[in-house]
Amino acid sequence: FIRTMAENLRPAVFVTIDQLDPTSKGQNLVLKVESIKVVVDKVRNDGTHIQIAEAIVGDQTGSIILTARNSQIGVVNPGSTIVVRNSKIIMFKGFMRLEVDKWGTIKPSQEEAKFQVNTQKNLSNVEYELVPQQNNQDADLRQ
């Protein structure tokens, strides 16, 4: 008896913004886009074009800055609902950013979100610092 790959897949588990922390990775979210701004738009020496944009995205529990790159930017439109899969939190100058690398996806949602984005609780506005532990072998992120 041979099992196919599809039979072995578990259903995706979706989380909300308030469940994210600096160590979050592999997270799936349904988010609404509030705004987007291109922060890098340049041509590299080898002729390739790179664009990086920061978008304010969120759900009813909070919001965060999503870093979108190149083709991801076309999906992230203000007012649209997106499905983010296999995302991770990166720390940028002590602040959290949501990012999707080559192993994840950002796609338009099949249905429009019925929630309003809670912009009052923006996780990217909370600064974290690296605090060494007693044994100096591990470090812990604290607000």
Image (tube, grey):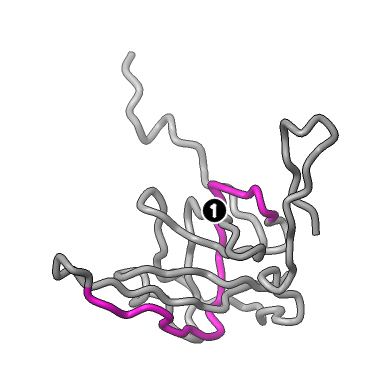
Residue at 60% of width from left, 54% of height from top?
Answer: 14
Q: Main secondary structure of the magenta part?
A: strand
- Which residue is rendered at x = 45% and y = 58% of the image? 100
- Specify the farthest residue to the right: 134
Could you say where residue 131 lies in the image, as x and y percent from the top left? 78, 48
- State the image coordinates of residue 83 (x, y, percent, origin top left): 48, 64
Q: Quadrant of the N terminus?
A: top left
Find out whether residue 99 is within the magenta segment. Answer: no
Front residue of 94/79: it is 94
The relative height of residue 114 versus residue 26 in the rendered view (above or below) is below
- The magenta-colored residue range is 21-43
Q: Nearer the viewer, residue 119 or 3?
A: 119
Q: Which residue is mark 1?
A: 88
Quadrant of the frame with the C terminus: bottom right
Q: Is residue 119 left or right of residue 66?
A: right
Q: Which residue extends farthest front? A: 136
Q: Is residue 69 above or below residue 141?
A: below
Q: Position of residue 89 (x, y in %)?
A: 58, 56
Of 60 and 125, nearer the camera is 125
Tell me the kind of residue under disc 1.
Lys
With 21 as the anchor, is 89 left or right in this view?
left
| Image position of 82 (left or right of 117) | left
